[in-house]
Image (cartoon, grey):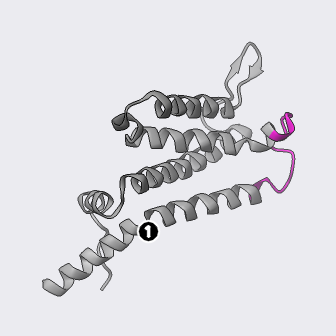
């Protein structure tokens, strides 16, 4: 018989009790990176194909690439890390902002490396997207493994006692 999906309450409990504060921060950051990267890929492909309501952002006729927003976000997180007190530095929103900002930068790394807009230049772009997606998903899974282990152990204990 398949085990039912854990409830949000069970997941929160496992998150709080199976991870140290540093591990919690890493997991939130990985999940944010993964979801942001995936969302940005979907949005950029839809913009490239001319589908959907979103379009490139321009200022004075100049395209503002999304790595700019990533650099600003990671810079703000750095400011919090340097000057914020511990409760702000460890706040899940800071970890989420870091992961999201990093995803925005990584997504346009080729542009930063060449300093030219080579974003769609190669046919192999899909393979890069898939590779980064696999890395992001694997990192999220590894960072979250203690939570999964905790949920499994809880379910096993409940099954044996009930």
Characterize the magenta stretch by its predominant secondary structure. loop
Determine whether, in the image, residue 160 is placed left or right of residue 12. left
The residue closer to the viewer here, 158 or 123, is 158
Q: Position of residue 107 (x, y in %)?
A: 69, 44
Is the residue 28 above or below the residue 54 in the image?
Answer: below
The quadrant holding residue 138 is bottom right
Residue lying at 81% horizontally and 44% vertically, measured from the top left:
120
Residue lying at 82% horizontally and 40% vertically, measured from the top left:
113
Determine whether, in the image, residue 109 is placed left or right of residue 8. right
| The stretch drawn in magenta includes residue 160 | no
Q: Position of residue 82 (x, y in %)?
A: 50, 31
The residue closer to the viewer here, 117 or 51, is 117
Is the residue 66 above or below the residue 38 in the image?
Answer: above
Q: Residue furthest top?
A: 60
User: How many numbered marks have been drawn onto this rendered protein structure?
Assistant: 1
Determine whether, in the image, residue 142 is placed left or right of residue 11. right
Q: Position of residue 32 (x, y in %)?
A: 50, 47
The quadrant holding residue 149 is bottom left
**Which of the image's four quarters has the C terminus?**
bottom left
Determine whether, in the image, residue 142 is placed left or right of residue 44. left
Residue lying at 49% horizontally and 38% vertically, measured from the top left:
97
Residue lying at 74% horizontally and 12% vertically, measured from the top left:
60
| The stretch drawn in magenta includes residue 122 | yes
**What secondary structure is marked by label 1?**
helix
**Which of the image's four quarters has the N terminus?**
bottom left
Is the residue 146 above or below the residue 98 in the image?
Answer: below
Pointer 1 residue: 145
The quadrant holding residue 147 is bottom left
Q: Position of residue 47 (x, y in %)?
A: 69, 37
Magenta residues, start to end: 113-126
């Amino acid at each position: 018989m398949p085990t039912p999906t854990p409830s949000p309450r069970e997941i929160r409990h496992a998150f709080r009790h199976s991870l140290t504060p540093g591990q919690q921060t890493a997991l939130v950051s990985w999940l944010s990176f993964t979801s942001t990267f995936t969302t940005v890929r979907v949005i950029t492909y839809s913009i490239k194909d001319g589908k959907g309501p979103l379009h490139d952002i321009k200022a004075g006729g100049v395209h503002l690439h999304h790595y700019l927003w990533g650099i600003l976000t990671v810079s703000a997180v750095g400011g919090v890390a340097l000057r914020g007190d511990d409760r702000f530095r460890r706040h899940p929103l800071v970890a989420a902002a870091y992961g999201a900002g990093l995803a925005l930068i990584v997504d346009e790394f080729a542009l930063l490396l060449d300093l030219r807009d080579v974003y769609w230049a190669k046919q192999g772009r899909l393979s890069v997207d898939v590779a980064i997606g696999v890395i992001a998903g694997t990192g999220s899974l590894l960072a979250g493994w203690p939570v999964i282990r905790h949920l499994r152990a809880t379910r096993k204990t409940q099954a044996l006692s009930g």
